Image (cartoon, rainbow, N blue to C red):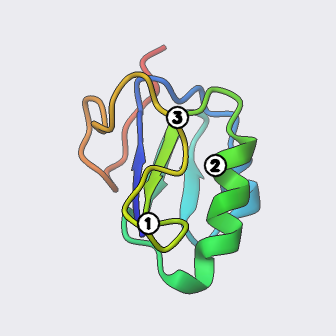
């Protein structure tokens, strides 16, 4: 499973961090850090985090066991201005 968070889209609501704390962590008020290669044991929690993101900033490949995106992301699958798993602000 491969995760990408569009850090330009992320607004720091932290729903993902509440639902999958082993994968997503909010540092400070606006800085999200995440594991881009979450394990299969996190699949259900990640699926809930993807669904709960109010701005649909999280894209997951392989959530259903296939290599198809689990969440539509019109901005593309790039991680914005920071690489996957790096700490970055949300652009405010």
Which residue is more in the foreground, 20 or 28?
Answer: 20
Pointer 3: what residue?
57
Specify which label sits upstream in the sequence, 2 or 1: 2
Residue found at the very far top of the displayed protein? 92
Q: Mark 3 and mark 2: span between their CA atoms?
A: 8 Å
Specify which label sits upstream in the sequence, 3 or 2: 2
Seen at 68% across and 53% down, the residue is 49
Which residue is more in the foreground, 73 or 89?
Answer: 73
Left/right of residue 33 with respect to residue 23 in the rendered view: left
Q: Reply above or below: 57 against 64.
A: above
Left/right of residue 69 with respect to residue 86 in the rendered view: right
Q: Quadrant of residue 89?
A: top left
Secondary structure found at label 3: loop
Pointer 1: what residue?
62
Secondary structure found at label 2: helix
Q: Quadrant of residue 17?
A: bottom right
- Number of residues whose C-alpha sits closer than 10 Å to that of mark 1, classed few (under 14), some (14–19) or many (20 or more): some
Seen at 51% across and 43% down, the residue is 58
Pointer 2: what residue?
50
Which is closer to the viewer, label 3 or label 1? 1
Relative image position of residue 56 (x, y in whole percent): 59, 32
Q: Are marks 2 and 1 in contact (CB under 8 Å)?
A: no
């Amino acid at each position: 499973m491969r995760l990408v968070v569009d850090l330009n889209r992320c607004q720091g609501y932290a729903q993902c961090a509440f639902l999958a704390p082993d994968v997503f962590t909010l540092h400070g008020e606006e800085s999200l850090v995440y594991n881009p290669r979450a394990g299969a044991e996190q699949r259900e929690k990640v699926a809930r985090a993807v669904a709960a993101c109010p701005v649909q900033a999280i894209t997951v490949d392989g959530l259903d066991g296939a290599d198809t995106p689990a969440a539509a992301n019109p901005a593309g699958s790039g991680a914005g201005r920071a690489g996957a798993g790096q700490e970055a602000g949300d652009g405010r």
